[in-house]
Amino acid sequence: MDFEKLISERYSVRSFQSEHLPKDVIDKILAAGHKAPTGCNYQPQRILVMNTDESISKLKKCTKCHFNTPTAMLVCHNKEESWVRKYDGALSSPVDAVIVTTHMMLAAQNEGVGTCWVMHFDPTAMREAFDIPNNIEPIALLVMGYPSDDAKPLDMHFQSRPIEETVFYEEFNQSFEKEHEDVF
């Protein structure tokens, strides 16, 4: 699919058909995440695939935002395998996991699979339900499946702030800085 078309047509799907995704489709989505860049290529991401009735049942106890998904992926990062920024000790692994998640979300769209990125989940409940070790930090949940016939984007999907409010160039002048003091 054309990239512009892919990113324009992707939206957060909250209504799915009931069947689990086939393994070959899951493998394509995971392969896209595997190709994502990570800090120093440490690849600290850990992805838990939930594609059975049993695992989805466990998931539903950890979040109300499951949208009756037939398949989900919990993207985590291994804090012990992260590149660390020397200036302030910031870890790259949470960012790495988010980049991986984005790659998988777009790959899913390319395969005709709808996704919704969920942050509203209980990480402690996830740890307990799926025996996740303490050094592995759950960061993003992708619920996914084939969109139901009535799936559609929420109205707010089509609303964006003007790009001039979110993008700034280095060539700031004093009047611009004064006008946007609340941003800086």
Image: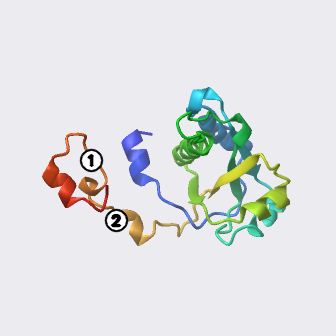
Question: Which residue does the image show at 84% across and 60% down from the upper left?
Answer: 128
- Left or right of 19? Residue 153 is left
Give the residue pinned by disc 2. Answer: 159
**Mark 2 closeness class: few <14, some 14–19, many ≥20 residues within 10 Å:** few
Please say which color scheme the image uses. Answer: rainbow
Q: In the figure, residue 142 lies in which quadrant?
A: bottom right
Mark 2–mark 1 Cα distance, whole angstroms, equals 20 Å
Residue highlighted by disc 1: 168
Residue 95 picture location, percent across and down: 56, 43
Do the CB atoms of the residues marked 2 and 1 lie less than 8 Å apart?
no
Identified by mark 1, the residue type is Phe
Above or below 136: residue 142: below
Number of the front mark, 2 or 1: 1
Q: Is residue 155 above or below residue 53?
A: below
x and y percentages locating residue 80 in the rendered image: 73, 38
Residue 95: give its label: none
Amino acid at circle 2: Gln
Q: Nearer the viewer, residue 179 or 12?
A: 179
Q: Secondary structure at mark 1?
A: loop
x then y, percent, for residue 145: 64, 56
Residue located farthest toward the top when viewing the structure as drawn: 40
Image point (34%, 65%), residue name: 159
Q: Earlier in the sequence, mark 2 or mark 1?
A: 2
Q: Quadrant of the C terminus?
A: bottom left
Q: How busy is the neighbourhood of tag 1: few (under 14 within 10 Å), some, or many (20 plus)?
A: few
Residue at 57 percent across and 32 percent down: it is 39
Element type at marker 2?
loop
Image spot of residue 40 (x, y percent): 59, 27
Give the quarter of the figure containing the N terminus. Answer: top left
In percent of the image, x 54 and y 62: which residue is there? 13
Q: Depth check: give the residue in front, 66 or 78.
A: 78
- The image quarter in which residue 124 lies: bottom right
